Image (spheres, helix red, strand yellow):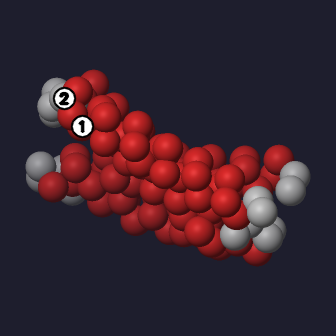
Amino acid sequence: MTAFPLLLLALAILSEVTATVCLRMASAGGGRWWIGVVAGYLTAFTLLAAVLAQGMALGVAYGIWAAAGVALTAVISRLVFKEPLTWVMSLGLVLIVGGVLLIETGAAH
């Protein structure tokens, strides 16, 4: 596999996380944030479809998407919104990333 699907996947993840942060802002009453929600999710799913069209396995693509999205969203929510990120939550993130690595390793065989 070339680096192009990974680049598309990284952009899809960033778009999804951006849309999720915009969703948090929109839920607090910011009407213009809904534009970021719609544009971000539309971009994210379009890019994910392109990743799958490039031949990346669905389980691998979605696993990376989910793990990276959860981790980035947790860190951003801690930094921007001052939401908690405890050691137990951090351990959970490590376990999610480890699980995705196992899925990807298993898919290679």
Q: Name the secondary structure under disc 2.
A: loop
User: Tag 2: Cα neighbours inside 10 Å, few (<14), some, or many (≥20)?
Assistant: few
Q: Is residue 52 left or right of residue 25?
A: right
Residue 60 at what x, y percent from top left? 62, 62
Which residue is pictured at 31% across the width and 42% down the height? Answer: 92
Check the image and name the residue furthest to the right.
Answer: 2
Residue 84 at what x, y percent from top left? 15, 31
Q: Is residue 105 left or right of residue 36?
A: right
Residue 73 at what x, y percent from top left? 35, 42
Name the residue type under label 1: Met
Residue 95 at what x, y percent from top left? 40, 43
Check the image and name the residue furthest to the left.
Answer: 28
The disc placed on residue 86 is 2
Seen in the picture, residue 32 relative to 60 is either above or below; the reply is above
Residue 51 visible in image: no
- Please state, as top left, top right, bottom left or bottom right, where the N terminus lies in the image: bottom right
Q: Is residue 60 left or right of residue 14?
A: right
Name the residue type under label 2: Thr
The disc placed on residue 9 is none
Nearest to the observer: residue 32 or residue 75: 75
Which residue is pictured at 23% across the width and 27% down the height? Answer: 87
Quarter location, residue 88: top left
Nearest to the observer: residue 109 or residue 96: 109
Which residue is pictured at 36% across the width and 40% down the height? Answer: 93
Residue 41 visible in image: yes
Nearest to the observer: residue 95 or residue 65: 95
The disc placed on residue 89 is 1
Circles 1 and 2 in contact, beta carbons < 8 Å: yes
Q: Name the secondary structure under disc 1.
A: helix
Which residue is pictured at 48% across the width and 44% down the height? Answer: 97
- Please state, as top left, top right, bottom left or bottom right, where the C terminus lies in the image: bottom right
